[in-house]
Amino acid sequence: MTIQLGNVLLTNAKGGKFIPLRGDGGDAPTWKSQWLKVIWNPSNYGDPEAVRVSMCLEPDDAAKAFFRDTEERVTKALSEHSLRDSRIFGKPLKPEEVKERMASAVKTSTRGTEFLKLKMNWERVRERTLALGTGEYFVTTRL
């Protein structure tokens, strides 16, 4: 998979900097898994109007490999980008220095199990249907 950094440096409401990430064909990188268990329901941290929520999933091997590979490619791309444009970090950084500043989506719990911690935007969810462990489906709603 090809990873491309967008050419626009954006800033969120809290001052955090980010660059759009694109994969093959200019679309956002995506992956498919047969099954990902929702460990904790999407959380809005007490803000019922929140559109962007955290979601934790139990990943399969394909999802873990996808995120680790993508993060490695992003680290390298950001390091190369920092040589040409200092707006992101303020100075050029080596890949290992970029990695120190990144937060991986693949987390390890205190019990030693791995999970994915992702952000989900309710306004951008394409299909609001998630499967339950029982094989039943439910349509998600904002929490």
Image: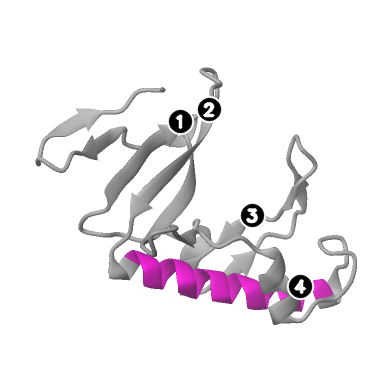
Real-space Cα separation, disc 3 to disc 1, in angstroms: 19 Å
Which of the two marks, 3 or 1, is nearer to us in this view? Answer: 1
Q: For this view, does 68 lie left or right of residue 95? A: left
Kindly give the residue lying farthest to the left in the view shown: 135
Cβ–Cβ under 8 Å for marks 2 and 1: yes
Q: What stretch of residues is rendered in magenta?
A: 63-82
Query: Residue 81: which disc?
Result: 4
Query: Residue 20: which disc?
Result: 3
Determine crowd level at label 1: few under 14, some 14-19, many 20+ residues with C-alpha closer than 10 A: some
Residue 32 higher or lower than 61, as above or below: above
Real-space Cα separation, disc 2 to disc 1, in angstroms: 5 Å
Q: For this view, does 103 lie left or right of residue 70? A: right
Amino acid found under the numbered disc labelled 4: His
Q: Earlier in the sequence, mark 4 or mark 2?
A: 2
Amino acid found under the numbered disc labelled 3: Pro
Q: Is disc 2 placed on a helix, strand or loop? A: loop
Cβ–Cβ under 8 Å for marks 3 and 4: no
Q: Earlier in the sequence, mark 3 or mark 4?
A: 3
Determine crowd level at label 3: few under 14, some 14-19, many 20+ residues with C-alpha closer than 10 A: few
Q: For this view, does 39 lie left or right of residue 43? A: left
Q: Which residue does the image show at 31% across and 32% down from the upper left?
A: 128
**Splitting the image into 4 quarters, where does residue 79 fall?**
bottom right
